[in-house]
Image (spheres, helix red, strand yellow):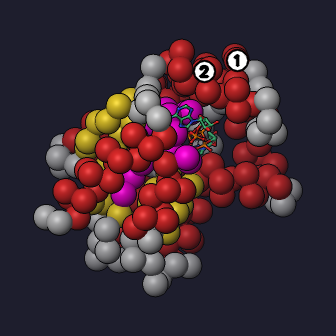
Amino acid sequence: MFNIILFGPPGSGKGTQSEKLIAAYGLKHLSTGDLLRTEIANKTPLGIEAKTIMDKGQLVPDEVVVGMISSALENNPQAKGFLFDGFPRTTAQSEALDKLLQLKNTEIGVVLAMDVSEEELVKRLLNRGLTSGRSDDTNETVIRARIKEYQDKTTVVANYYSQFNKVVHLKGEGTVEEIFSSLCSEIDKRMSN
Ligand code: AP5
């Protein structure tokens, strides 16, 4: 089993590259953002609570997202590996994920961190907000709050995995194909070890 964390700020291209990577490597895609938006669409109590938080650009409580990931891991016993997108976002989430993977006798193979400038992130998200229907994309103040939340609470996740020598930083600007190709070459290097 080979597990990947696709890491980066809001708008860095995690969702875009995840689609291509799961097709190329046959991994199961687990996006906490997508799982939360499904709860919102289904108007569940969890979704209603999460929407208020997401609309402010803040992080949903750790126990909520860890619970969702735990169920998703249990529900996919046949997966040959997982691609985590938008998770983990705090040190507590990273530690919880490591424990969950240990129970399955597996671990994170690599953390691929895509670096993109703040102005490019804002431009991409405002542009997507014109058509996506995502309420957290339509307002620049909320977009900048999401980026700040990332800087304050999520960049530490890369430090956490650096201590295990698992983090690779890549340029997240350029064409989608160029970035995909550099992600694949890093995955191939680690997979063959
Ligand atoms: P989430 O859904 O994870 O959103 P995000 O991290 O804010 O990321 P995005 O989906 O906005 O961006 P992305 O990096 O996937 O980029 P994409 O490929 O879409 O989280 C949303 C909210 O849910 C959070 O704010 C939080 O409240 C909550 N949440 C989720 N997970 C949580 C967790 N673990 N803990 C706590 N709370 C959690 O690309 C963006 C745009 O750029 C697209 O239009 C795309 O077409 C374009 N684009 C992509 N690549 C390129 C390129 N190379 N050049 C130009 N444009 C590009």
- Provide the secondary structure element on which disc 1 rests: helix
Q: Residue furthest bottom?
A: 78
Q: Magenta region: which residues?
A: 4-16
| Near-viewer residue (169 or 96) | 169
In percent of width and height, residue 61 lies at 59, 45
In percent of width and height, residue 2 lies at 31, 68
| Mark positioned earlier in the residue sequence (1 or 2) | 2
State the separation of the CA atoms marked 1 and 2: 7 Å
Q: Residue furthest right?
A: 43
Judged from the image, the quadrant occupied by ligand 1 is top right
What residue is shown at x 40% (from left), y 40% (from top)? 179
Q: Is residue 169 above or below residue 74?
A: above
| Near-viewer residue (180 or 107) | 180
Which image quadrant for residue 43?
bottom right
Answer yes or no: disc 1 within 8 Å of ligand 1.
Answer: no
Q: Which mark is residue 122?
A: 2
In percent of width and height, residue 178 lies at 39, 40
Q: Which residue is mark 1?
A: 140
Find out whether residue 9 is within the magenta segment: yes
Q: Amino acid at mark 2?
A: Val
Q: Classify residue 97 as left or right of residue 45.
A: left
Q: Classify residue 103 as left or right of residue 16.
A: left
Query: Which marked residue is nearer to the observer: mark 1 or mark 2?
Result: 2
What residue is shown at x 35% (from left), y 63% (from top)? 3
What residue is shown at x 26% (from left), y 43% (from top)? 167
Which image quadrant for residue 59?
top right
Q: Amino acid at mark 1?
A: Glu
